[in-house]
Image: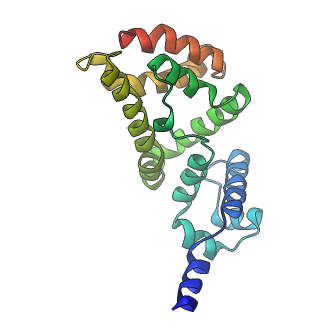
Amino acid sequence: MAGAQGTTTRRSRITPEREAELYGAVLDLLREVGYDALTMDGVAARARSSKATLYRQWGSKAELVVKALRHQKPVRIDEIDTGSLRGDFRTLVSLNDDCRMERDGALMRGLAMAMHDNPDLHRAFHELLIEPEMTGLDRVVRRAVDRGEVSADNPALGYIVHMMIGAFVGRNMIDNQPVSQAFLTSYVDAVILPALGV
């Protein structure tokens, strides 16, 4: 029995350190070649792993890429609870420095283009990254509603994610500049919080 469990564990689990190393290799390669040119063979070579291991652990290139993106998020949004919505948003903005936001912004723009032609990537991105982020943000905002900071019938409640994504897309498209902590803080204070009546 113990032997069977040990075999199963070896086959289905890798250490957190090795997982982080693999995810780092995936993101480095993704930044270098883009999603379409990224292959499981290339990831296996970069990460000094076997392609069979990659498929056994992640099932597909799309899932591996999205889980690598998810892994680099240090805190789940729903874990943020400062006692005020303004404080929660400030904490959310402070999680990534300007350099990382610029690198990740370029990466996300490339993935957004790839999603148009790749339904597997779109599905994995939505299920593994967007839905958890939306759920986490909804919990943060629901706590603000419960505290009485935001009216439960405020029509802007259904558009917070859209406003946040708009900040990221619009900053680059309109101003030809990367998103920064200063820009996002100002945007939250000038756009999102007033829309919520805070």
Please identify the residue farthest to the left as the structure is shown. 153
Left or right of residue 196: residue 171:
right
Q: Please determine whether, in this image, residue 98 is positioned above or below residue 77.
A: above
Residue drawn at the location 66% of the way across and 22% of the way down: 178
What is the quadrant of residue 75 in the picture?
top right
Q: Is residue 34 left or right of residue 84?
A: right
Query: Does residue 156 show up?
Result: yes
Residue at the spot 54% in from the left edge and 65% down from the top edge: 58
The total number of labels drawn is 0
User: Foreground: 19 or 123?
Assistant: 19
Q: Position of residue 180 (x, y in %)?
A: 65, 20
Q: Specify how the rendered protein is coloured.
A: rainbow
Residue 176 appears anywhere in the view: no
Where is residue 53 drawn, in percent x and y? 62, 74
Query: Is residue 55 depicted above or below 98 in this figure?
Result: below
Residue 12: % across, % down: 56, 75
Left or right: where 112 falls relative to 141: right
- What percent of the width, then of the height, locates residue 144? 37, 22
> At 77% from the left edge and 68% from the top edge, which residue is drawn?
48
Point out the image quarter for the C terminus: top left
